[in-house]
Image (tube, helix red, strand yellow):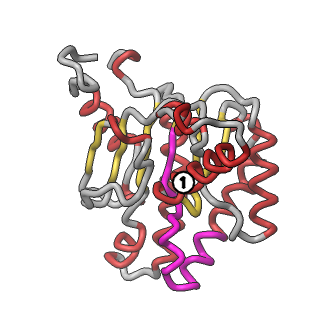
């Protein structure tokens, strides 16, 4: 596959950990642990394929409704991942990590780990990995609109000056290209409040495989589908 036919930015909804565990008679926490392993492998493979941006849906604003034990396990796994990132500097020196979402409700310990990792990797060049944590597409838009409304209130912004580009600039993914491709494993066929502004012209690939079983082979299959798509962005000429 030619490099020009590859997406610059991939979004992945990491779905199916609980069902993966249930099929094996394991607790849901075991599914999340397996899903974390799959995530690490996908980051490596995206780097190998020279993907520039990867955004993964790790924990939504709605996921707080899950049992406390499960939420605590997810947060613990995330903390372990952030710790591990410090231990393999040579392996991760080409990975810039960003956490997108509202981190305010997270524990002080987890917020400090996030701050350190983002600071440590901010100048890394290779792939930017956005981990969507306590993230919701509508919540992101509300956050951005409030920022613009405050500027209007302060008299530093005219309502007539609000453009699509300006709205994009106040989102968590500011200065990044919109996702070219969004992949959802698990057999579900919905966006689930993920990158709803940025996904306006994304290509979608839905796959009937649970996230812990999603690997390099599945990612390559999704990339093959993407390479065969005709992207016109409302025009009559394919891009």
Residue 129, picture quadrant: top right
Q: Is residue 227 left or right of residue 160?
A: left
Q: Position of residue 177 (x, y in %)?
A: 50, 30
Is label 1 in a helix, a strand or a loop? helix
Q: Is residue 62 magenta?
A: yes
Decide which of 118, 102 is in the foreground and name it: 102
Residue 176, picture quadrant: top right
Q: Residues within 10 Å of mark 1 (few under 14, many from 20)?
A: many
Decide which of 160, 84 is in the foreground and name it: 160
Q: Is residue 157 visible?
A: yes
Q: Is residue 44 visible?
A: no
Q: Is residue 109 magenta?
A: no
Q: Residue at left 23%, top 20%?
A: 235
Q: Is residue 129 left or right of residue 28?
A: right
Q: Position of residue 102 (x, y in %)?
A: 64, 60
Q: Say how many tags the image has.
A: 1
Q: Residue at left 60%, top 56%?
A: 101
Picture layout, residue 199 above or below residue 75? above
Q: Residue at left 48%, top 55%?
A: 57
Q: Position of residue 37 (x, y in %)?
A: 53, 56
The residue sitting at the left extreme is 236
Q: Is residue 165 left or right of residue 106?
A: left
Classify the position of the N terminus by image quarter: top left
Classify the position of the C terminus by image quarter: top left
Q: Which residue is mark 1?
A: 140
Q: Residue at left 49%, top 80%?
A: 65
Magenta segment boundaries in residue numbering: 54-75
Picture layout, residue 68 above or below residue 81? below
Q: Position of residue 111 (x, y in %)?
A: 76, 61
């Amino acid at each position: 596959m030619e490099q020009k036919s590859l997406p610059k930015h991939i979004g992945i909804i990491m779905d199916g950990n609980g069902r993966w565990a249930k099929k094996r008679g394991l607790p849901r926490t075991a599914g999340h642990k397996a899903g974390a392993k799959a995530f690490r492998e996908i980051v490596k493979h995206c780097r190998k394929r020279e993907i520039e941006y990867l955004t993964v849906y790790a924990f939504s604003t709605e996921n707080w409704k899950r049992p406390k034990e499960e939420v605590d396990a997810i947060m613990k796994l995330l903390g372990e991942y952030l710790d591990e990132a410090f231990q393999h500097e040579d392996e991760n020196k080409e990975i810039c990590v960003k956490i997108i979402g509202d981190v305010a409700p997270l524990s002080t310990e987890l917020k400090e780990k996030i701050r350190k990792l983002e600071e440590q990797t901010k100048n890394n060049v290779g792939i930017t990995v956005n981990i969507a944590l306590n993230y919701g597409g509508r919540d992101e838009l509300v956050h951005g609109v409030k920022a613009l409304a405050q500027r209007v209130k302060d008299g530093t912004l005219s309502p007539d000056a609000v453009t699509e580009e300006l709205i994009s600039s106040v989102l968590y993914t500011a200065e990044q290209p919109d996702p070219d491709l969004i992949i959802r494993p698990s057999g579900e066929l919905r966006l689930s409040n993920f990158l709803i502004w940025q996904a306006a012209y994304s290509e979608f690939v839905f796959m009937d495989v649970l996230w812990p079983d999603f690997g390099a082979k599945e990612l390559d299959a999704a990339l093959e589908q993407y390479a065969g798509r005709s992207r016109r962005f409302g025009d009559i000429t394919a891009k």
